Image (spheres, rainbow, N blue to C red):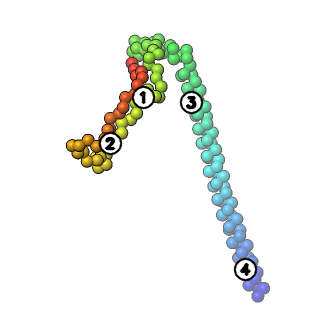
């Protein structure tokens, strides 16, 4: 009986050693993946900071003004007029489209309510873009 217990304990010890080795191997793989991801994150953060720096250089007002004056004949830019500024209320609503299967039968007699798919124009100034 003692030999059986000893053999069982040795088998459990070998099994435990194999399990610990497998866990160690998986932990090393996970650590390598974490390190790789951290390197990628650092590279992306560096790329983002370079892009932000490039954007700030490209959008400097003095540079933009120089480009506008250099290409004035092509761009044909003009100062903005107050009539060109509008509000959201100046935009007409989107016309309502009723599918053909939902449209009521049209009779020759006028009904109490008639549906229309036309947009109703708003009162007020219109937006003119040039």
Nearer the observer: mark 4 or 1; the answer is 1
Q: Residue 97: x percent and y percent? A: 34, 41
Q: Earlier in the sequence, mark 3 or mark 2?
A: 3
Q: CA distance from mark 3 to mark 2?
A: 59 Å
User: Foreground: 88 or 73?
Assistant: 88
In the structure shown, which secondary structural element does the residue marked by tag 1 occupy? loop
Q: Quadrant of residue 120?
A: top left
Any mark on residue 8, and which?
A: 4
Any mark on residue 91, and which?
A: 1
User: Foreground: 95 or 78?
Assistant: 95
Name the residue rendered at 46%, 23% in the picture.
86
Q: CA distance from mark 3 to mark 1?
A: 36 Å
Q: Earlier in the sequence, mark 1 or mark 2?
A: 1
Nearer the observer: mark 3 or 1; the answer is 1
User: Foreground: 19 or 55?
Assistant: 55
In the structure shown, which secondary structural element does the residue marked by tag 4 occupy? helix
Instruction: List the single residue furthest toward the bottom.
Output: 1
Q: CA distance from mark 4 to mark 1?
A: 84 Å
Nearer the observer: mark 3 or 4; the answer is 3
Q: Earlier in the sequence, mark 4 or mark 2?
A: 4
Q: Is residue 108 above or below residue 22?
A: above
Q: Is residue 5 left or right of residue 61?
A: right
Name the residue rendered at 43%, 26% in the picture.
90
Q: Which residue is mark 2?
A: 113
Any mark on residue 51, and which?
A: 3
Q: Is residue 13 above or below residue 53?
A: below
In the structure shown, which secondary structural element does the residue marked by tag 2 occupy? loop
């Amino acid at each position: 009986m003692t030999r059986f217990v000893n053999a069982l304990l040795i088998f459990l010890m070998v099994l435990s050693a194999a399990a610990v080795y497998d866990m160690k191997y998986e932990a090393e793989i996970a650590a390598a993946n974490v390190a790789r991801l951290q390197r990628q994150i650092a590279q992306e953060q560096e790329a983002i900071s370079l892009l932000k720096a490039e954007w700030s250089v490209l959008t400097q007002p003095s540079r933009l003004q120089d480009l506008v004056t250099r290409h004035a004949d092509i761009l044909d830019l003009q100062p903005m007029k107050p009539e060109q500024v509008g509000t959201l209320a100046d935009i007409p609503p989107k016309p309502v489209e009723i599918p053909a299967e939902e449209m009521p039968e049209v009779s020759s007699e006028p009904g109490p309510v008639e549906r229309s798919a036309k947009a109703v124009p708003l009162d007020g100034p219109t937006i003119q873009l040039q």
